[in-house]
Image (cartoon, helix red, strand yellow):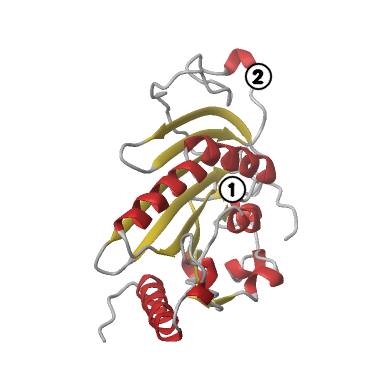
Amino acid sequence: MEKLALYGFNNLTKTLSFNIYEVCITETENERRQYIEYIDERYNSHRLTEILIQLSANIGANILNISKQDYDPQGASVTMLISEEPVSLGSIDKSCNLGLLPLTNETVLAHLDKSHITVHSYPESHPGRGISTFRVDIDVSTCGKISPLKSLDYLIGSFDSDIMTIDYRVRGFTRLDSGKKVFIDEKVDSIQDYIRKKTLDRYDSIDVNIYQENIFHTKMMVKTLDLDNYLFERKASDLPKEKQMKLRKTLKREMKEIFYGRNLYE
């Protein structure tokens, strides 16, 4: 899209909501406990903060403040305040930490502006299904020229993503020098256009877009189920064929229920 001659600051707010699910077979209480411990270690607040710091660099944003917290018994959250342009030290609120996390276990209070990034994780399991799931919600909201869509491939690669729900929307308006309102400043036909073909080829994908409202929605589910990728400290070759078939059926049902957002009955 041709560069727009704007009157003043770009007031458009662009929001990317990235929601991923990872699924694992955990048939015993010990497996469920070990899986939750594994997730809490691999995706604790420190690791999630590292992902968001790199994400900010990818979209060309400057970090002003970070707040992070691990939860008991499980889960973590990180909130990051960002800006499009660098902010002079004299103009930065003294409560901001400029991305330098204090050496303390206490919660750091944070405030949000129009540009921010948040992440929350939700590990869960149920003994009746023999399945554990891990969900991560990431929201990237920016104002100005920077677009959070640039971060998509990086986010997908940062997690073991079995199912993804991605939403992108543009809100507000900015003005041209002539005074005419602009409600979107980039050409977006589909969120999938911002994901590498190599990545897309691994997933079944559907779009639900409302172009006149600048709302774009994509859902993706992994195509191939390699049972070894879903067993916790076991190998598929060690299991009887009937057991392997049953576990694949359980996995497919779980993933379809998450993907379509409804319970399926046998």
Q: Which residue is pictured at 24% across the width and 68% down the height?
A: 128
Q: Which residue is pictured at 62% across the width and 40% down the height?
A: 56
Residue 82, x across and y down, in percent: 56, 34
**Which of 178/28 is in front?**
28
Q: Which residue is pictured at 61% across the width and 12% down the height?
A: 90
Mark 1: amino acid: Arg
Residue 40, x across and y down, in percent: 43, 43
Q: Give the labeled residue for mark 2.
A: 88
Residue 221 visible from this viewpoint:
no
Dot 2: element: loop
Q: Tag on residue 189?
A: none
Dot 1: element: strand
Residue 69 visible from this viewpoint:
yes
Contact between marks 2 and 1 (CB within 8 A): the answer is: no
* Mark 2 or 1, nearer chain start: 2
Q: Quadrant of the C terminus?
A: bottom left
Q: Quadrant of the N terminus?
A: bottom right
Work out whether 261 lies above or below 43: below
- Specify the quadrant of the image occupied by residue 126: bottom left
Q: Residues within 10 Å of mark 2 (few under 14, many from 20)?
A: few
Q: Which residue is pictured at 42% across the width and 22% down the height?
A: 105
Rounded to the nearest angstrom, the CA distance separating label 2 from label 1 is 26 Å
Q: Tag on residue 175?
A: 1
Mark 2: amino acid: Ser
The reply, left or right, for residue 232 in relation to residue 91 is: left
Residue 118, x across and y down, in percent: 46, 42
Q: Residues within 10 Å of mark 1 (few under 14, many from 20)?
A: some
The reply, left or right, for residue 264 in relation to residue 222 is: left
**Which of 60/84 is in front?**
60
Q: Foreground mark, 2 or 1? A: 2
